[in-house]
């Protein structure tokens, strides 16, 4: 019996259930979006596998045999349970949007704006996962990702969200203590951040390589930790004026110099191409890209990076 069931495709039982319920191969074909010949073939194949007739075929109608009636009752119950389970899974899935992103982007930009999305979409709950591990999306229950990189991830569709730009940031007290007048004065500072990014910034600020500052004394695996050190008066960090716009506006951080550098990489919105029309993903995509387009700091940074919010990745 186990081997026999293994040889019967679920689709054949679905076709049989429709034909048994409607007592018509033609109407079953219309309901399933198939041809009448395809329905007839599937049922004939099922009968051959079971080695017994399920329908009595008349000139203009069909009726169930006793064996067909027994199988029809079970098939209808099974299909009803399957339809109910699928509907419950889909409804539950559609009610939760799971976003994976980097910690700094989540805390400094996304979290402060998500309330607007939830107000506009009261039927959706949002779950945010912060991790540096790249998710395959879908298989682990995550719907969309906000990633840092080139915009080229195999198997995913990507749209440019915002540039990765950086400029020196420190507290007003640190700026005054160092008496910063020119970019070269930062050579006296306790620098925080990646060496290559500081070298790029000094070059953009017109400080000759021979006059560049010594290597930074502190680096971390995310921007949030580095800027937190600057907020703690531990030195001058390279940070994004986009992500730390609130702290700059409130005077917690200052930009001692306007020179800003854009990395070749940036932040991207990613999702499986086969799910681009899924309602919750489409709504989040439209909202987050529109939000970025109305952020003056993002627009200015995108101009500096030579990018456009919403452009497709590679």
Image: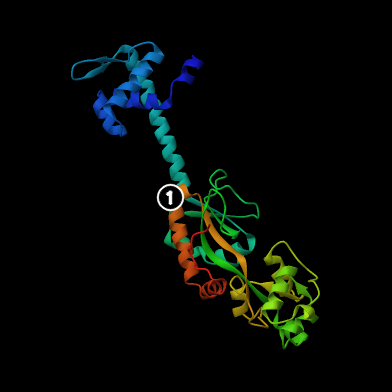
163 or 255, nearer to the observer? 163
Task: In the displayed orientation, state which residue is furthest to the left.
Answer: 60
Position in image of residue 228 (x %, y %): 71, 70
273 or 170, nearer to the observer? 273
Residue 68 sits above or below residue 228 on the image:
above
Position in image of residue 89 (x %, y %): 46, 40
Visible residue check, residue 209: yes
Q: Residue at 50% across / 49% down in the picture?
A: 272
Q: Residue at 68% across / 81% down in the picture?
A: 205
Q: Residue at 56% across / 74% down in the picture?
A: 304
Q: Is residue 186 left or right of residue 84?
A: right
Visible residue check, residue 77: no
Position in image of residue 61 (x %, y %): 21, 19
Q: Quadrant of residue 235?
A: bottom right
Q: Quadrant of residue 282?
A: bottom left
Q: Residue at 80% across / 70% down in the picture?
A: 217
Q: Which residue is mark 1?
A: 278
Q: Secondary structure at mark 1?
A: loop
Position in image of residue 93 (x %, y %): 47, 46
């Amino acid at each position: 019996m186990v081997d026999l069931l293994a040889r019967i495709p679920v689709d054949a039982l679905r076709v049989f259930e429709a034909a048994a319920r409607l007592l018509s191969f033609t109407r079953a074909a219309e309901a399933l979006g198939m041809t009448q010949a395809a329905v007839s073939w599937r049922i004939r194949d099922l009968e051959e596998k079971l080695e017994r007739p399920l329908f009595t075929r008349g000139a203009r109608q069909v009726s169930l045999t006793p064996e067909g009636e027994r199988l029809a009752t079970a098939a209808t119950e099974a299909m009803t349970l399957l339809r109910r389970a699928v509907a419950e899974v889909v409804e539950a899935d559609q009610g939760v949007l799971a976003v994976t992103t980097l910690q700094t982007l989540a805390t400094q930009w996304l979290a402060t704006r998500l309330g607007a999305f939830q107000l506009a979409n009261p039927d959706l709950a949002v779950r945010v996962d912060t991790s540096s591990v790249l998710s395959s999306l879908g298989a682990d229950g995550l719907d969309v990702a906000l990633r840092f990189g080139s915009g080229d991830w195999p198997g995913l569709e990507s749209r440019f969200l915002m540039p990765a730009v950086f400029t020196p940031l420190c507290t007003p007290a640190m700026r005054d203590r160092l008496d910063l007048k020119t970019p070269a004065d930062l050579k006296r500072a306790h620098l925080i951040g990646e060496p290559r990014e500081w070298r790029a910034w000094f070059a953009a600020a017109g400080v000759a390589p021979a006059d560049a500052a010594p290597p930074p004394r502190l680096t971390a695996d995310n921007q949030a930790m580095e800027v937190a050190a600057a907020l703690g008066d531990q030195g001058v960090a390279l940070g994004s004026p986009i992500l730390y716009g609130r702290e700059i506006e409130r005077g917690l951080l200052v930009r001692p110099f306007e020179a800003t550098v854009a990395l070749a990489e940036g932040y991207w919105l990613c999702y499986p191409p086969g799910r681009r029309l899924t309602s919750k993903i489409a709504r989040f995509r439209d909202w987050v890209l529109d939000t970025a387009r109305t952020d003056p700091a993002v627009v200015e940074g995108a101009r500096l990076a030579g990018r456009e919010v919403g452009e497709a990745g590679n």
